[in-house]
Image (cartoon, helix red, strand yellow):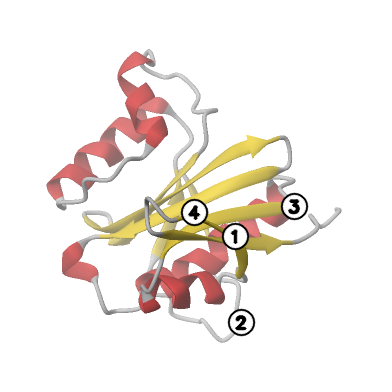
Amino acid sequence: MIELTPLDKDEWMPRVRVQVIETADEARRVLDELVTAGIRSDIQSMDLIAQKPPGADWPEGYVVRLALGPSTILGWAHARRSQRRTAVLSWETARASWDHGYMREAIPRIVQWLLRRRGIIEIYAAVPIGDDKSEAVAKRGGFEPTEQGDPAKRTHLWLCKGAPETA
């Protein structure tokens, strides 16, 4: 797993470990953790885990494990490429971890990692309409609301734009 370090020099003692899954084996372990933590979301790429042989790479998207320590999972985030330089990001916090600001701490790291290290220039997120906490997470990650949404799913599409840094 890749560990994403804090962005802000003032964040000297981060509460959340942000770990990017790189193999199908890691994804299987994280899926087990998510189920144990009561997180039952529709991570689309997770359906592909069963089809992957042991030791396979995980190219379908970036699944991110959020944890306090080795055995405490707080939630997940999932970024999948929708086009060559565009990604869709989704996230969920375990119910026991609600109202602690963990996602507000983690999402900016994930967004910056996608923009700076993965060549993504646009990231979209479908945020539930009227969900102030999810909107706060999106704003902290640099997202802005667009005019688009899905009334049937009661979501509003948010967009974060950036240019990848060159080395």
Q: Which residue is mark 3?
A: 121
Which quadrant of the view contains residue 142?
Answer: bottom right
Q: Amino acid at mark 4?
A: Glu
Name above or below for residue 73 compared with residue 58: below
- CA separation, marks 4 and 1? 14 Å
Q: Which residue is mark 4?
A: 3
Depth order, front residue of 152/138: 152
Q: Secondary structure at mark 1?
A: helix
Mark closer to the observer (2, 3): 3
Depth order, front residue of 82/165: 82
Q: What residue is rendered at 13% in x and 46% in y?
A: 36
Q: Which residue is mark 2?
A: 9
Q: What residue is rendered at 59% in x and 54% in y?
A: 124
Q: Earlier in the sequence, mark 2 or mark 3?
A: 2
- CA separation, marks 3 and 4? 22 Å
Q: Which residue is mark 1?
A: 111
